[in-house]
Image: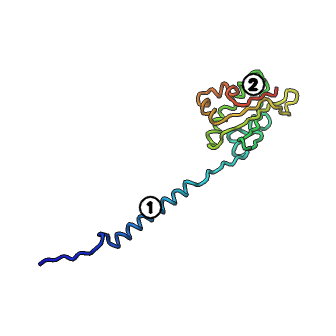
Amino acid sequence: MNTRRHRGGPGWTIPALALAAAAGLALWGTTACRSEREAAPKVREEFSLASLTPVFGEARDANSGLADFTESDQGLILSYHFYLTDRTDADQEIARELAPKIRRLYGRFRNVDRVSFEVSMPDKASPDYWSPYVSFSLTRKIVKRTGWTDLLDTDLLGNALNVRRTR
């Protein structure tokens, strides 16, 4: 007579249970580590004259460029000296000068949203003195909407926010 021995139980062996427990712990551990990595805070971009000068150029002597900047809770505030002696078409000249630089700024600094510009020009009476000409603000949304169709080149101040002329 051929008899079989049976073990009582569900059919799981101790090594199989240990393997299943180890796999579950490993899966839980990788999920926990991945969620910690995803929750890392965004890196805030640091601005300096050294990081902004390659985008706008440096204002000196008869060269247009960035004179100074400030960061606020509203965004960047850039002081730009625009060297122009004939002011007949000043608005179009400002647009031609600044539009490619504005595109470069938004392309290079991905976290920049709102930027305010204070554009100064040489004073007519004293060319060594820079007098405010116009101030305006732009957002990333405006630049995306207009910047790639060259509309920013031709009508920068018409698309900008809070345009204030001082003259």
Give the image location of residue 138, x and y in percent. 68, 34
Dot 2 amino acid type: Ala
Residue located beneath label 1 in the image:
27
* Quarter of the figure that contains the N terminus: bottom left
The residue that appears at 61% across and 50% down in the rendered structure is 42
The quarter holding residue 100 reads: top right
Instruction: State the count of labels.
Output: 2
Say left or right for 64 vs 20.
right
Front-most of 30 and 124?
30
Give the image location of residue 98, x and y in percent. 69, 32
Q: Secondary structure at mark 2?
A: helix
Residue located beneath label 2 in the image:
90
Give the image location of residue 132, x and y in percent. 81, 31
Say left or right for 24 vs 165.
left
Task: Using the image, determine if residue 81 lies above or below residue 9.
Answer: above
Task: Using the image, determine if residue 55 lies above or below residue 15.
Answer: above
Say left or right for 10 vs 154.
left
The residue that appears at 13% across and 77% down in the rendered structure is 2
Front-most of 125 and 167?
167
* Quarter of the figure that contains the C terminus: top right
Of labels 2 and 1, earlier in sequence is 1
Alpha-carbon neighbours of circle 2 within 10 Å: few (<14), some, or many (≥20)? Answer: some
Alpha-carbon neighbours of circle 1 within 10 Å: few (<14), some, or many (≥20)? Answer: few
